[in-house]
Image: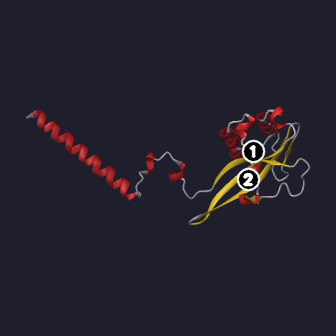
Amino acid sequence: MKYENEAFRGLKLIGWLFLLSTVLVASHKGEFWPFSIYPMFSQAGNSWSRALLIEIEPDDTTNIWDEKPLGSIDQRNVVPVKRLGVDQIDYSNFISKTERWTPGRINALKTLFPEQQLQGKTVMATKATGKLVREDSVAVILTPMFRISADTIRVNPLITIDPPD
């Protein structure tokens, strides 16, 4: 008798928890947000930023620092950073999340790319910022940050360089 009473109480508790979770999920359009770890759900509609590495002509200096829409670049010029021995997530976080650029941070960016991999290439470290412009449309703007070659790094003149710490 005692076990039946405890089993009934346990089933009743499980039923209430099931009902509570059903109500919470139903009221949040199928997602119970405190448990959401996926930014595509928990941050939908917010602007975002990532980084691209774009190969450019070494002698190209016309309008290289102008912002451009993503559709204006030739996708064949996008350089997979993994091919250069750089982790994509590290590179993207470095470019998109750095708020204060110092000479040390710029030097760290330069050391991210092995010189031998950049021989004969000039690349543009670019910040890609996307935002929802209509209910069903996203605009992605590319902001050139750094022009990198095997021996030099040039900074976009619009970027403020803080003094060394």
Total of numbered circles in the picture?
Answer: 2
Q: Residue at x 74, y 55 (%)?
A: 142
What is the quadrant of the N terminus in the image? top left
Q: Amino acid at mark 1?
A: Val
Task: Point out the residue furthest to the bottom here.
Answer: 134
Q: Secondary structure at mark 1?
A: loop
Where residue 99 sits: x, y (%)? 72, 46
Where residue 112 sits: x, y (%)? 76, 35
- The image quadrant of residue 7 is top left
Task: Point out the residue furthest to the right here.
Answer: 59
- The image quadrant of residue 82 is top right
Seen in the picture, residue 115 relative to 130 is either above or below; the reply is above
Q: Which residue is mark 2?
A: 75
- Which disc is residue 50 wearing? none
Q: Residue at x 83, y 37 (%)?
A: 118
- Which disc is residue 79 wearing? 1
Question: Camera-side residue: 40 or 27?
Answer: 40
Q: Secondary structure at mark 2?
A: helix
Where residue 66 sits: x, y (%)? 82, 58
Scheme of image coloration: secondary structure
Q: Residue at x 83, y 33 (%)?
A: 115
Q: Amino acid at mark 2?
A: Gln
